[in-house]
Amino acid sequence: MIVIAFIVAFFFAMNMGASGAAASMGVSYGSGAINRKIIALAICGTGVFLGAVIGGGEVVKTIGSGIVPSELITIQTAVIILGAATISLAIANLIGIPLSTSEVTVGSVVGVGLAYQSLYVESLMTVVMFWILIPIIAFLFALVMGKLIQIIQERYGAFLEGRWKKCLTVLLIIMGFLEAFSAGMNNVANAIGPLVGAGLLSISHGTLLGGAFIALGAIFFGGKVLETNGKRITKFSLLEGSAISGTGAGLVIIASIFGIPVPLTQITTSAIIGIGTGQNGFSFLQKNIILQMVKVWVVSPVFSLVIAYGMVKVLLDSDFYTISVIGSVFIATVGSLSLIKTIKAEKRTIHEQGGGI
């Protein structure tokens, strides 16, 4: 069980590095501030590792003992938490629903707590409050920045493309590094927190190992994500990209200092929406993005909570009646989400072909 716990944790860490952490350098790479992919990934890996080692400890404490009593986090429940989070992400990938690793991990911990009817509700509510407030703050701050940047670019656009371009390029790279740093601070707990809670690792050793595996995942497997994100964000200027990365990095670092696991992707997306809204106003595309974020926020913890709760009931309590009921509801929910996604895709295809329903 100990070997399985470490394998799952490190596998989870590498996947976080490949998917989430690597995206932190997308703005720098896509805007041309960094031309070589390997350099962008190396900067990302360095930032993630340093963030985990220097500032990841507080979030590790929250995941390991801040949501449920530490005595509930045994080797068996640690494997269940990590397994539930991994399975949730795998199922979500199959049906095309993006999930937040931080929210999935918290949901898994809560699932274990509910199974044993022992949960720190006040701490959990604090975490949920941050999930709601931080994306809103990111949007409002970026909205103001977007309006200021628009004014600056209209008045001094030619000047910014001249002698100050190199300075803005360096600023964007620094902001990307800080975003990777913040990802390391916040995300290392998702993989290592249960192991620390179970007493298998100290916080210092956990953040060191966890940070190393997240960095390895970003460097060796993050190229595709970096390429995809880079192509999507080339429409942002150097100044806009610095504002987006800086907003996400600053808020996530603050949350990490207080030990709050937060969804970096949703915060960055909120900042992007804020920049766009400040310059162009709301659009239907942005409204769709907001709806998608709300869906991810709701579905992420529920997915992993149900799986973790069910695994405890079956594997540790042998309560097959309860799990049969929960399993039926869960399968029906997943099926419904998949069906809705299919119907929307069919409607979109018919619309593009000029047909009607």
Image (spheres, helix red, strand yellow):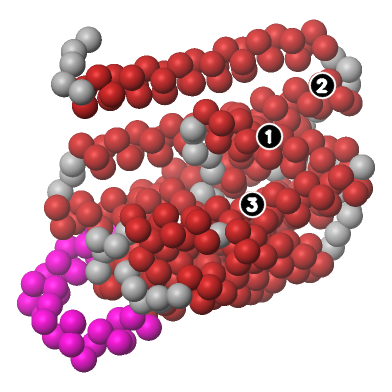
The residue under the point 16% across, 57% down is: 279
Outermost residue to the front: 353
Provide the residue span drawn in magenta.
Answer: 142-170
Q: Which of the labelled discs sits on residue 15, or is there none?
A: 3
Q: Read off the residue under disc 2.
A: 313
Q: Is residue 148 left or right of residue 98?
A: left
**SS at circle 2:** helix
* Numbered disc in front, either 1 or 2: 1
In the rendered image, residue 354, in percent from the top left (x then y), is placed at 16, 21
Name the quadrant of the C terminus: top left
**SS at circle 3:** helix
Q: Which of the labelled discs sits on residue 87, or is there none?
A: 1
Q: CA distance from mark 3 to mark 2?
A: 27 Å
Outermost residue to the bottom: 163
Q: Nearer the viewer, residue 3 or 69?
A: 3
The residue under the point 63% across, 64% down is: 220
Q: Is residue 142 left or right of residue 204?
A: left
The residue under the point 45% across, 75% down is: 36
In the rendered image, residue 79, in percent from the top left (x then y), is placed at 82, 40
